[in-house]
Amino acid sequence: MAFRLLPALRRSIGVFSSNYQGSKLGGFSTHSRKSPGKGNASFFALAAAAAAGYSWLERYDETSITLSPELHHLLMRFWQQGLESNYQSGIQTDVPGSVNCFRTSNTDACDTSSLSSNPFQTESQSNVSASPKSDSTCLTRHSIADAAAKVAPAVVNLTVTQGLRGMFLGRSIGSGTIIHSNGTILTNAHVVAEFTSAGVPYKGKVVVTLQDGRTFDGEVINADFHTDIAVVRINTNVPLPAAKLGSSSKLRPGDWVIALGCPLSLQNTVTAGIVSYVDRKSSDLGLGGMRREYYYLQTDCAINEGSSGGPLVNLDGEVIGINTMKALAADGVSFAIPIDSVIKTVEHFKKHGRVVRPWLGLKMLELNELIIAQLKERDPAFPDVTEGVLVPQVTPGSPAYRAGFRPGDVVVQFDGKPTKSIKEIVEIMGDKVGVAFKVIVKRSNNIQLTLTIVPEEASPNLF
């Protein structure tokens, strides 16, 4: 706090020196006060300076102020008591630059337009509220609770009880989020998976329990086990509370997030944390069996069995991810599917009834300056590039093989756009199967070629 108050304290000491003349505070000599209205406030500023551990010597006109060790010790206790009182009562100290909130966006400063130019103006002198302005740019004591309250009515508990020929096989529990008032629910595909057949959604009844205790029967409308996204629909004639979907594209490590769900069937559970990493690759998680790279949001929110399918929410109360898994050997290492990816999957469901994945037949590796330097050290003929995607392997008989790709090619442009990552290539292709794309590659000795590739629809068994 001392660091944030420092500019205001310098100004406040100036106010003090202009009000008190001829006073040497170290010895408490006599003084004459010009302005009776500001003495206590300036004394408060001096106490803050003393508590901050500074020995001040400020000169304004003919006045100098020096804090003696005795005064510093005396005011230190007084200032600490004031701090404890402020934290307990939640009272805002109206000092410019010390708004009682944390930043939650990348704007330059909290809204201080309502603060007076006088850093110690009392309530009778101004209509400034004791608490900071509540908006999405400041984290207050109620920010997490308010955000959770916006989405909580739309969070549901899902229960799937399965049997075979009258014999009980097991029960799957999970969470979900109502995204439309007609009863459309987002959840994880593994929550509603068939026990007896891998990669097949459950065809029976799904019991859906709302936050308010109401229970409905639902059915799985669609599911994709590669993205781990499923859509469940419940039949109701009454509009249901729906959560607002946000965007995950601008999330950064350190952003506050909230996880809601029903871990261990404990409904209405809220945990909070931060984004630990954005775009965590599936290969980083040991999911090497997938031919295509998938990306996750890594957070330190606490999730457990039953949390799967629940929403990950920002401080605006918007869903920015679907919680899907956690690291078993660690605490505070959880993963969610970015909502932007979820939305694309749902769009595929609506358009095709399934997720359509274009297949090129390329194994790809993203390049950076350090990797490029290492490759050039091993092979001086490696092309002169600063970025791109390396092709270490081409599948025989694939669209890439027929297009003329070779191992060692570096993709620098895909469909007329500079290429830096595999994710960009996947996003450019979208669901375009049978559509020709122009690709610029560089080979050894800086040979540049333009190839034409026509993606095929991937077989589900390839992923």
Image: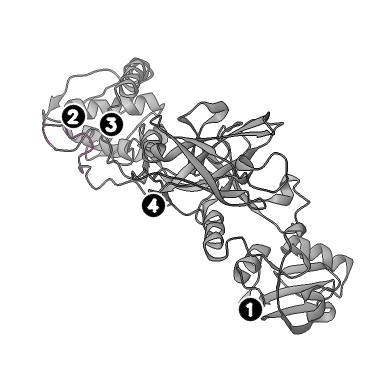
- Seen in the picture, residue 190 relative to 418 is either above or below; the reply is above
Indicate the position of residue 146 as horizontal and vertical percent values. 35, 36
For disc 4, the marked residue is 108
Type of residue at label 4? Answer: Asp
Q: Residue at x 74, y 63 (%)?
A: 459
For disc 1, the marked residue is 415
Q: Residue at x 69, y 39 (%)?
A: 195
Q: Marks 1 and 4: in contact by CB < 8 Å?
A: no
Indicate the position of residue 417 as horizontal and vertical percent values. 61, 76
- Quarter occupied by residue 19: top left
What distance separates the C-alpha of mark 1 from that of mark 2?
A: 74 Å
Mark 1 or 3, which is nearer the eye? 1
N-terminal of the pair, mark 4 or mark 1, is: 4
Report the front residue among 140 and 205. 205
Is 260 placed left or right of 200 in the picture?
left
N-terminal of the pair, mark 2 or mark 3, is: 2
Type of residue at label 2? Answer: Tyr
Q: Which mark is residue 20?
A: 2
- Quarter occupied by residue 356: bottom right
Mark 4 is surrounded, within 10 Å at the Cα level, by few (under 14), some (14 to 19) or many (20 or more) other residues, namely: few
What distance separates the C-alpha of mark 4 from that of mark 3?
A: 20 Å
Q: Which mark is residue 7?
A: none
N-terminal of the pair, mark 4 or mark 3, is: 3
- Quarter occupied by residue 403: bottom right
> Which image quadrant: the N terminus?
top left
Badge 2 element: strand
What distance separates the C-alpha of mark 1 from that of mark 3?
A: 55 Å
Q: Which mark is residue 92?
A: 3
Report the magenta residues as a range. Answer: 117-125
N-terminal of the pair, mark 1 or mark 2, is: 2
Instruction: Tell me how the rendering is colored.
Output: one colour
Is 344 placed left or right of 379 in the picture?
left
